Image (cartoon, rainbow, N blue to C red):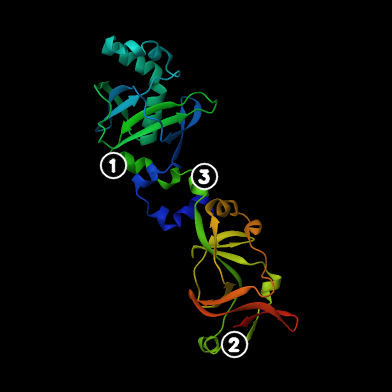
């Protein structure tokens, strides 16, 4: 499974609102500024001053605040005296210096952008506003801007595919795990009759590596990560659960051998599980030269 497929299988991500996704520090939108490949991210410091533009995104009116930047040389030259520059001239400088940024925004929100004029103020403090930066690949200072948001823009930008699965805030999140050493079919009557001292032979516990059940959603094996659903069979599992990071799960998509725990040792505490319920407890041991679970 690919990282995005894993996120889509987790309710906290699959059911996340556009607002929650856009508020994530992992939100990243690959984009292009002119011919330069770059990335848009949120969480930029709020600039002390911005040039505020009235813009129209198709039938929606918005205010775009652009911070001073070396990327806008002619606009920067008049930045401190911009209040004295006639509006037509100032808009001409915006068109010349900021045209690539305006095109980037138009592509990002999938709406035709038109500059209407100069706005007197940035978006109101109580408005839903994003503060974004466009990071350049050559370590140049990022371009910072603000834009008030509408529901249609939120729906366009706040998509799960825009979550950077390599971001620490995603990779370091943990999920509960259960280590499974063996599984087999046994009638309900036979499993109910298990008594202290009984032994269940587990040949696969020696010949096959364990698999890890993650968040009751995935099975991690030496082949990688796959979706998992509980079946009406008996499963021999480690008595204690553990956790795994999403990053480890992502890295195991094509082969999870490195993330698997070792086979059980002698006297390892075990649980016998059926449909999520513990049927019996016991320990790992050897019977007549074969691996077995001894029921407590």
Residue bearing the label numbered 3: 168
Alpha-carbon distance for marks 3 and 1? Answer: 28 Å
Q: Residues within 10 Å of mark 2 (few under 14, many from 20)?
A: few
Q: Secondary structure at mark 2?
A: loop
Mark nearer the viewer, 1 or 2: 2
Q: Is 208 above or below relative to 24? A: below
**Outermost residue, right side:** 289
Residue 169 tag number: none
Alpha-carbon distance for marks 2 and 3? Answer: 47 Å
Residue bearing the label numbered 2: 196
Q: Secondary structure at mark 1?
A: helix
Q: Quadrant of the C terminus?
A: bottom right
Q: Residues within 10 Å of mark 1 (few under 14, many from 20)?
A: few
Q: What x and y, as percent, mark residue 97?
A: 40, 17
- The residue drawn where x is 59% and y is 51% is 251
Q: Secondary structure at mark 3?
A: helix
Mark nearer the viewer, 3 or 1: 3
In contact (CB < 8 Å): disc 3 and disc 1:
no
Residue bearing the label numbered 1: 151
Task: Give the quarter of the image for residue 98.
Answer: top left
In contact (CB < 8 Å): disc 1 and disc 2:
no
- The residue drawn where x is 44% and y is 35% is 41
Mark nearer the viewer, 2 or 3: 2
Tell me which label, 2 or 3, sits earlier in the chain: 3
Q: Is 198 above or below relative to 49? A: below
- The residue drawn where x is 37% and y is 23% is 67
Tell me which label, 1 or 2, sits earlier in the chain: 1
Q: What x and y, as percent, mark residue 228?
A: 51, 65
Q: What x and y, as percent, mark residue 267?
A: 66, 75
Viewer-side residue, 277 vs 242: 242
């Amino acid at each position: 499974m690919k990282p995005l497929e894993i996120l889509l299988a987790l309710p906290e991500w699959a059911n996340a609102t556009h607002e929650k996704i856009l508020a994530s520090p992992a939100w990243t939108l690959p984009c292009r500024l002119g011919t330069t490949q770059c990335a848009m991210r949120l969480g930029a410091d709020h600039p002390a001053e911005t040039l505020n533009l009235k813009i129209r995104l198709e039938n929606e009116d918005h205010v775009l605040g652009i911070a001073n930047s070396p990327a806008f040389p002619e606009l920067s030259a008049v930045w401190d005296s911009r209040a004295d520059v006639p509006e037509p001239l100032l808009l001409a400088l915006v068109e010349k210096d900021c045209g690539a940024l305006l095109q980037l925004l138009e592509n990002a929100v999938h709406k035709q952008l038109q500059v209407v004029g100069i706005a007197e103020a940035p978006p109101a403090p109580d408005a839903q506003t994003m503060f974004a930066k466009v990071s350049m690949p050559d370590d140049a200072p990022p371009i910072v801007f603000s834009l008030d948001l509408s529901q249609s823009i939120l729906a366009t930008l706040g998509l799960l595919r825009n979550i950077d699965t390599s971001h620490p805030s995603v990779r370091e999140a943990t999920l509960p795990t259960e280590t499974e050493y063996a599984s087999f079919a046994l009638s309900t009557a036979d499993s109910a009759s298990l008594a202290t001292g009984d032994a269940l032979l587990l040949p696969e516990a020696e010949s096959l590596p364990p698999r890890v059940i993650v968040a009751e959603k995935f099975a991690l094996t030496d082949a990688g990560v796959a979706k998992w659903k509980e079946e009406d069979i008996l499963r021999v599992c480690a008595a204690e659960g553990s956790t795994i990071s999403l990053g480890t799960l992502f890295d195991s998509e094509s082969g999870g051998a490195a993330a698997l725990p070792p086979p059980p040792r002698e006297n390892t505490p075990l649980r016998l599980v059926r449909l999520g319920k513990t049927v019996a407890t016991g320990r790992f041991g050897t019977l007549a030269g074969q691996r077995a679970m001894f029921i407590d």
